[in-house]
Image (cartoon, grey):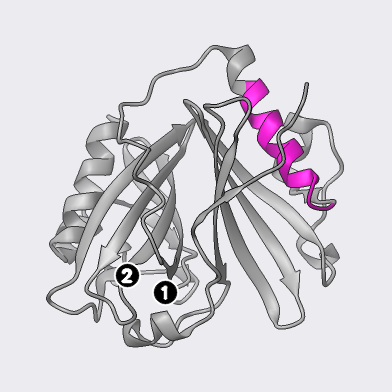
């Protein structure tokens, strides 16, 4: 079902089919994306508004854990060349309930070694080990807090929305599937909150890799301005090898 839903989203994006995108959404769908106004939206089709007719979307990777579905892809036909895209959905009863996204400059395709695959339930110990390894790699770059929704899961204290201070990071969501772990965090900066996505590939114990994409938590003024907004980057980078 998850694989089928990801393909339906890909087709709607690639063909700019707003009606098909809207049909995937629950009545109480809520939009949190960087390219539309946060809050209630008329459905997922709103993110396709204003895209050029030669826009193309290619799905490179899907991850799924529980109610969370992640699509990682490449957008063609936008100003500034190909852009990397991360779309994070919360799914309930086969319908999209919430959506977060980010776009960023893509100097080269970082997804070539990855592949679209069906979701398979990993062994619990392997699943938790990979998630904890990604969190350790994140923590090696600086301290972070957990959102309240994650505190019970990781046995940590959380920061409420008003407690996040400039220069701090709050981990919002984690999605682990196969050898990949996606971490969604809120970064408090002097210019306002930003959402960061880190996609870790932990398939090689001696050489973990990480791709990062950061987006402002604010509407992007028009699709034509997407490439002009500083979204950070999405490119492969080596991370410190974690020893257990």
Residue placed most toward the observer, 98 or 232: 232
Q: Residue at x 18, y 59 (%)?
A: 14
Image quadrant in which the N terminus is located? top left
Q: Main secondary structure of the magenta part?
A: helix
Residue that label 1 marks: 35
Q: Quadrant of residue 124?
A: top right
Indicate whether 112 appears above or below 194.
above
Say which element carries label 2.
helix
Query: Which x, y percent locates residue 217?
Result: 58, 72
Residue placed most toward the observer, 228 or 169: 228
Tell me, yes or no, whether the highlighted magenta stretch contains residue 141.
yes
Q: Whole-Å distance between the Cαs marked 2 and 1?
A: 7 Å
Q: Which residues are magenta?
A: 128-142
Whether residues under marks 2 and 1 lie with C-beta atoms below 8 angstroms apart, the answer is yes
Image quadrant in which the C terminus is located? top right
Residue that label 2 marks: 47
Q: Residue at x 81, y 51 (%)?
A: 144
- The numbered disc on residue 72 is none
Indicate whether 7 appears above or below 34.
above
Query: Which x, y percent locates residue 143?
Result: 85, 51
Q: What is the tally of numbered marks visible in this picture?
A: 2
Residue placed most toward the observer, 151 or 179: 179
Q: Identify the mark nearer the N-term, 2 or 1.
A: 1
* Horizontal arrangement in the rendering, residue 127 relative to residue 78 (left or right): right
Query: Which x, y percent locates residue 41?
Result: 38, 69
């Amino acid at each position: 079902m998850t694989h089928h839903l990801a393909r339906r989203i890909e087709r709607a994006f690639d063909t700019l089919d707003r009606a098909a995108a809207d049909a995937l959404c629950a009545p109480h769908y809520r939009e949190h994306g960087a390219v539309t106004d946060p809050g209630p939206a008329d459905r997922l089709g709103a993110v396709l508004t204003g895209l050029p007719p030669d826009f193309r979307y290619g799905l490179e990777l899907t991850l799924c854990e529980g109610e969370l579905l992640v699509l990682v892809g490449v957008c063609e036909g936008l100003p500034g060349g190909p852009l990397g895209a991360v779309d994070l959905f919360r799914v309930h009863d086969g319908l999209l309930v919430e959506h977060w996204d980010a776009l960023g400059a893509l100097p080269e395709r970082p997804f070539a070694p990855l592949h679209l695959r069906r979701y398979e339930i990993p062994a619990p110990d392997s699943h938790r080990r990979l998630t904890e390894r990604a969190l350790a790699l994140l923590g090696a770059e600086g301290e972070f807090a957990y959102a309240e929704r994650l505190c019970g899961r990781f046995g940590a204290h959380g920061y409420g929305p008003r407690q996040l201070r400039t220069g701090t990071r709050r981990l919002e969501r984690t999605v682990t599937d196969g050898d990949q772990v996606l971490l969604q965090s809120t970064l408090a900066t002097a210019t306002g909150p930003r959402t960061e996505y880190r996609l870790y590939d932990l398939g090689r114990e001696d050489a973990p890799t990480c791709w990062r994409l950061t987006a402002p938590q604010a509407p992007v003024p028009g699709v034509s301005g997407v490439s002009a907004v500083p979204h950070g980057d999405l490119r492969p980078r080596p991370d410190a090898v974690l020893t257990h």
